[in-house]
Amino acid sequence: METKLVKVDSENPERELLTEAAEILRKGGLVAFPTETVYGLGANGLDGDACKRIYEAKGRPSDNPLILTIGDISGLYPIVSRVTENAEKIIDAFWPGPITLVLPKADCVPSAVTGGLDTVAVRYPSNKIARELIKLAGIPVAAPSANSSGKPSPTRASHVAFDLDGKIDMIIDGGAADWGLESTILDVSEDKLVLLRPGAVTQEMIEKVVGPIDVDPAVYSKPSKDIVPKAPGMKYKHYSPSAKVILVSGPGDNVIRTINEKVREDEAKGLKVGIMATVQTENSYESGNVLVVGDRDKPETIGANLFKILRKFDFIGADVVYSEVFDEDGEGAAIMNRLNKAAGFNYIRC
Ligand code: TXA
Ligand code: MG
């Protein structure tokens, strides 16, 4: 299959291009499009066969359910059977935006979307291209991240093309995703709300609106037989480049010294070594391929670049990557959740 790549203006999306994309979606095809978090791979969310194509293109395990995206709030009611009071509060506070809500599903939602669960995850993105496209399609659009399963999520059209060229109908290039990490996922299907995946809308922000919430233990710990994530996708090794990623934590000077030692040892063995550094530390490393992920004083820069930098380590063929770690406060929770998964919770503590 030939994948058509189209550039669309993120401020004033060209209507005729989005109309063409919407038509592909309505006919059962696959279109990748930008959102404010990461790029999504869209299909008609009411068409089980179209959704199955998403699983094939991504190589995604079939028990990992899809998110349904909507283009305006009226799109929510046909696909859920109940909107809880707390869900209303979260919707008022944060939609459209980077938070996905898990709600009891309506009968029209195919099991190819939910992986057989009786809930459905719904997201109303704020990105203009995404909203216009979904509205023009006139259907809920199933949209997981547009990467090959297991690889870091795509934050640019070029990442999507690298993973999925030839496997999908169209890629809409709307520039770099603003936030760069996937949406927060909050289960609002029962009285007690549960954070399933941290993202741009932080636990603190949610608790200001609805009071204390639970956090799925799998958010901060390695999944095991006792810790089974409620978001099925969180159990897979995820977000990972081909290189082995090792996180190094401890006082700043120790981290730099330890990484320098490890890089020397690994290079002596003939390994290609990457170092994920920050603007604060980039000049402290003596060898290895140093890539700067962002500025510790501006955590949003780290979120925006994390997946791009993990992909770059693949591109340069790194065997091992040593990474610094970050504060888990606020948006840092999302950064460390993804980094822990990329590393399979592999730490050197120094
Ligand atoms: O920011 C995002 O959410 C991006 C953009 C493209 O919208 N999408 C995204 O989708 O990250 P995906 O498929 O990569 O991640 C969706 C996660 C998976 O871990 C999946 O298991 C979980 O949501 N999920 C989907 N439906 C669920 C449900 N009914 N209950 C619990 N978790 C669910
Ligand atoms: Mg994903």
Image (spheres, grey):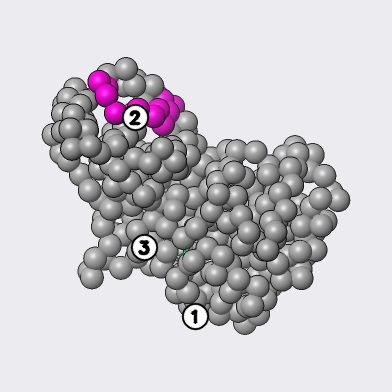
Q: Position of residue 252 (x, y in %)?
A: 22, 25
Q: Can residue 135 be seen in this snapshot?
A: no
Gap in angstroms between the C-alphas marked 3 and 1: 18 Å
What range is drawn magenta here?
285-299
Disc marking residue 116: 1
User: Within 10 Å of the Cα at label 1, are there few (<14), some (14-19), or many (20+) other Cα atoms?
Assistant: some
Gap in angstroms between the C-alphas marked 2 and 3: 28 Å
As drawn, the residue found furthest toward the front would be: 270
Q: Mark 1 against mark 2, which lies toward the viewer? A: 2
Q: Residue at x 55, y 60 (%)?
A: 144
Q: Can residue 14 be seen in this snapshot?
A: yes
| Quadrant of the snapshot with the N terminus | bottom right
Is the residue 297 above or below the residue 334 in the image?
Answer: above
Gap in angstroms between the C-alphas marked 1 and 2: 44 Å
Q: Residue at x 71, y 71 (%)?
A: 28
Secondary-structure class at tag 3:
loop
Disc marking residue 105: none
User: Within 10 Å of the Cα at label 2, are there few (<14), some (14-19), or many (20+) other Cα atoms?
Assistant: some
Q: Residue at x 45, y 70 (%)?
A: 61
